[in-house]
Image (cartoon, grey):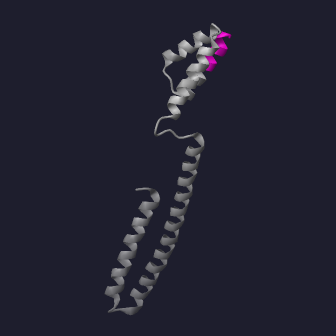
Amino acid sequence: MKKEDAIRFAGLMEEYLNIPAFVCEMIEKQLEENKYKEVVEYVIQRRNEIENKPDYMTEQEKIEIFESRENENKRLNNIINELEKYTIEQRNIAKDNLEIIGNEGKRMATRFVVYNEYLDKLKALKEGK
């Protein structure tokens, strides 16, 4: 095999199989010497080692987990948005009642403060704080 092709292949295997640089150099030399069988056996052995690790995940499994998390994030953001709308509505109702009621205003003022605090917590959650 040509040196350039051997270097390219070894580099791909380094990334794919997570192998150290000195092993890549060995693979390059073996490929240049047309010792393909040794290289293939090593690649298969290394791949089997990786797949047999208890925490090994296929690319498809990684994609499914990522998509699942993305969907869950969207769902949670929708819930936060709905809670935010509801809280704003309730805060506005409490504010309107506070202006109208007078003596009952203390109770409404407390609700108004609670809704404001709740809104602050929702905004912080939405921003990931």
The segment highlighted magenta reads: 1-9
Q: Is residue 34 left or right of residue 89?
A: right
Q: Position of residue 89 (x, y in %)?
A: 49, 78
Q: Compared with residue 101, is residue 35 higher up or lower down, i.e. above or below?
A: above
The residue sitting at 58% across, 25% down in the picture is: 44
Q: In which quadrant of the rendered view does residue 47 lie?
A: top right
In the image, 10: left or right of 128? right
Work out whether residue 65 or residue 38 is closer to the camera in this orientation and state it. 38
Residue 119 rendering spot, x and y as whole percentages: 42, 69
**Residue closer to the observer: 74 or 36:** 36
- In this orientation, which residue lies closer to the viewer: 51 or 2? 51
Task: Name the main secondary structure of what is drawn in magenta.
Answer: helix
- Quadrant assignment for the N terminus: top right
Note whether 46 is above or below 98 in the view shown: above
Residue 97, quarter of the rendered image: bottom left
Image point (48%, 21%), residue name:
20
Q: Is residue 68 left or right of residue 129?
A: right
Q: Quadrant of the C terminus?
A: bottom left
Image location (x, y in percent) of residue 71: 56, 57
Which quadrant of the view contains residue 122? bottom left
Residue found farthest to the top = 33
Q: Is residue 22 above or below residue 18?
A: above
In the image, is residue 60 part of the stretch drawn in magenta? no
Residue drawn at the location 64% of the way across and 14% of the way down: 36
Reply yes or no: does residue 8 show up in magenta.
Answer: yes
